Image: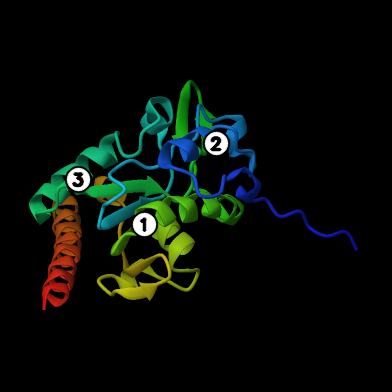
Amino acid sequence: MARKTVSTAAPFVPPAATSTQLWEAAQECKGCDLYRNATQAVLGEGPATARIVMIGEQPGDQEDRAGRPFVGPAGRLLDRALEDAGIARSDLYITNAVKHFKFEMRGKRRIHKKPGEIEIVACRPWLAAELSIVRPEVIVCLGATAARAVIGKEHRIERDRGKFFSHPWARTVTATVHPSAVLRAQDDEARHKAYRAFVQDLKAVRRKLETTARRGAA
């Protein structure tokens, strides 16, 4: 019986690379089929000394065109939530679990399409390479795709929200909703409630870091 081909970006990821080298190498990645239609691969941005890494799902339409993560509506909501939670975005490294935009055409519009297991697994070497450079204290998974890529298939956002877990990539990892989920709430009341819960999750991350800092100074 023929073996099933496993898609992976691993052969395209240069060892011991800088962030710039990773970005350049990612533009040549053919680890899955998403590269065929996307404008470019979009890796993360932020300081290599960041104590927090936030991981979303994939670049959207605006991110795909700009080559930067979280610059669209979800990114603007995240900026506001970070400010309300007392976290500076300039202190974060922010990226996505999948590096190419997966979409379907509806007329002239490119509509987001959720990444599947093949794309999540294929892109994991890029994520591992980014995190090996940053070495954060806390990883925050934004949404189910990121949680699946980092924590595993068994994680459920609603059940495990607010919990922190140990992880080889960081001292601790947690997961909350993706900012786009807040934007998709059915009405203003639901949106305000979802936003407040999202900010509370981010405040818990800030408190976790503050506790870690106090223990380190003791």
Per the image, the residue denoted by label 3 is 89
- Would you say 7 lies left or right of 50 here? right
Q: Is residue 6 above or below residue 218?
A: above
In the figure, is residue 89 to the left or right of 62?
Answer: left
Tell me if label 2 and label 3 are in contact, CB under 8 Å.
no
Which secondary structure lies at badge 3?
A: helix
Q: Quadrant of the N terminus?
A: bottom right
Quadrant of the rendering where the C terminus is positioned: bottom left
Discs 2/3, front = 2
Mark whose residue sits in front, 2 or 1: 2
Q: Which mark is residue 25?
A: 2
User: Which circle's residue, 2 or 3, is located before the other in the chain?
Assistant: 2
Residue situated in front as seen by the camera: 60 or 46: 46
Please indicate, yes or no, whether residue 10 appears anywhere in the rendered image.
yes
- Could you tell me which secondary element the residue under label 2 belongs to? helix
Residue type for callout 2? Ala
Q: Is residue 112 visible?
A: no
Q: Residues within 10 Å of mark 2 (few under 14, many from 20)?
A: some
Whole-percent x, y for residue 28 in the image: 60, 33
Q: Amino acid at mark 1?
A: Gly
Compared with 28, 54 (above or below) is below
On residue 143, the disc is 1
Mark found first going from the N terminus, 3 or 1: 3
Residue nearest the viewer, comparing 42 with 11:
11
Please provide percent x and percent y for residue 66.
37, 26
Amino acid marked by disc 3? Arg
Tell me the SS state at disc 1: loop
Q: Is residue 47 left or right of residue 82?
A: right
Query: Left or right of 199: which side holds 69?
Result: right
